[in-house]
Image (tube, rainbow, N blue to C red):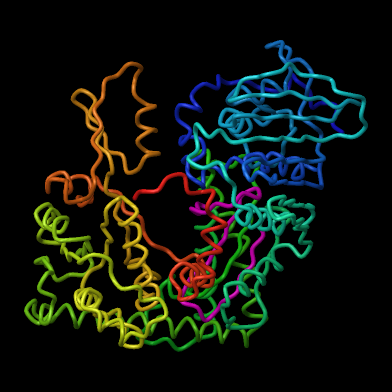
Amino acid sequence: MSASYTAKDITVLEGLEPVRRRPSMYIGGVDSKGLHHLVWEIVDNAVDEYLNGYADSITVTLHKSGDAVTVTDNGRGIPVDLHPKFKRPALELILTTLHSGAKFGEGGNYIHSGGLHGVGSSVVNALSRKLVATVVRDGFEWMQTFRRGKKVTELEKVRPLRGHGTTIYFEPDPEIFKSTLFDADTIKAHLEDMSYIHSGLKIVFRDETRKEVHDLSHPGGIPEFLGALVKSAQKQPVTENFFHVKSDETKVEAALQWTESTEEVLRSFVNGIRTVSGGTHENGFKSAVAKAIRNYIETHDVKVKGLTITAEDIREGIVGILSVFTREPMFQGQTKERLNNPEMTATVDGVVRPALEAWLNANKQSADRIVGRIVLAARAREASRAAASEVKRKSAVNRRLNLPGKLADCTSTDPEETELFIVEGDSAGGSAIEGRNRRTQAVLPLRGKVLNSEGMPSVKVLANQELANLASAIGTGLGDKFNLANLRYGKIILLMDADYDGHHITTLLLTFFFRHMPELIRRGHVYLAQPPLYRIIVGKDTYWARDDVHKEEILRGLRANARYEITRFKGLGEMTPKVLGETTLDPKNRTLLQVQIDSDLEADQVFVTLMGKDPSQRYEFIMNSAALAEELDV
């Protein structure tokens, strides 16, 4: 154990109070994603002890109630001695004060760390109705209890005990989160990712809700991780062998395999933390892959005459994993979803590019198959672009033949700027038609709930008038006759009421697109509009809330004793065209959610369960999820 890691190493920057007032600033939101981020923060602290050579085991327990988690590590244990300046135990300072910890100073307590902001533990404490910290160090077991960020008990020396480590038990605060129930599968998947990245770390997940214990140790590391990703996604590899590089000097490791899929899958990590929004390290990886392939094509004089190969062609179908470690990571935001360190682009490129070039030259048979697959991707893209150009050259009159009568089309014929809003009912359709930009925005009203197309052949789907109108407006055709080159609108936006009926219709339409036009989703053409559910007027200011959680978040942000007026919209038809246009249609103000498929297999299972013909699967899902239903809109 390090004798230098004491209370004087703890640096305090500022107080704790803002967290409960603005939780989204610290955890990204108060939805399920934000809830689970609490677990990641505590686990990241435990992993930091492993990264710096002080721990080799972490146990995460989801308790039987489903709304409480315990994280235990065998690291050094949080210091419990009095801080020389603040005269309070270091443990209490860390858990009750923002920007406090041993990761700011120059004492070398943490060479690599995922949590450099000194925020995570105190944020979890602030957003928990109860948190109990237990520390074993200096020959004793110590304990202190907190409630909503404030101490309930003084630090207590419980008993003499050999060993060292930290245990954090916490219960998220129902005053903050809409639901405090954790999802065991989400926690397990996250921990499993970490066990691949940290191949020397033993991670145990105890799921008391299902009475299961999972040993998530993966000594095979990132190569084993790559194989698991390719297999679970059911992607056919182009070659059996794969590329792997690891630099102990720069702390960069990557693995890569090309598949026959049209998707690009890249999982990146910084100091063991998943960076779902990428960043400079991903940029370096992507650049390296493109350069290595181009150098191979040039060196071996591969015939690609008249064909322009883009970086997207090269990366189509890849499954890649990138892990980097850096002493001073610059994350974008507390949720650490993107890395901003400018030097990491060149660092990763400098490791991956020469190693990939050497691998391609040493595995020429595999390299030729990979390049052949890339050439086919480029030809398919150019053929599609040529077909799209041919469509653009057609007259506007030809493009509008056989279009549904209810479609209020736009005047532009360029798919790169046009949008189709699919709305629920004539009333909402009327408001949308009046509030839209007539040059680029088209509106198609639907009558009631559309047909559930799960498990239906395209012929039967087209027999339904509403879905036939929708297919006609989009222009691509269905199933085997689908042709993306005939797409009439670059964005297809589902605009439904912000209630349960609206969510149901959205689900029915997503089922239609996933089963009969999946390429529209894969190519990023399908979006969900986010119309406001509430209007909040405070004096001369107007705020728009998309749901109850957002409304409460806005209200908490108002000054004390502020007078306000709240209007709840029962449907889009209640909004004036001007309000709908400004809040939901205008690209300058609106919020759109792009529909993406992270896993074809998981998406398939969800649609089969929720929309399929077998009611027993739906019944099981409803019974297992009953505790999440806090209110019904009936």
Return the residue nearer the eye: 250 or 121: 121
- Asked whether, in this view, residue 616 is left or right of residue 521, the answer is right
* Residue 282 percent coordinates (x, y): 53, 57
Return the residue nearer the eye: 288 or 622: 622
Above or below 456: residue 89: above
Magenta span includes 262: yes
Above or below 274: residue 439: below
* Residue 522 percent coordinates (x, y): 40, 70
Q: Which residues are magenta?
A: 253-280
Above or below 295: residue 90: above
* Residue 386 percent coordinates (x, y): 26, 82
Residue drawn at (58%, 21%) of the image: 13
Above or below 365: residue 407: above
* Residue 423 percent coordinates (x, y): 22, 61
Number of marks present in the image shown? 0
Magenta span includes 203: no
Residue drawn at (35%, 57%) of the image: 503
- Asked whether, in this view, residue 129 is left or right of residue 315, the answer is right
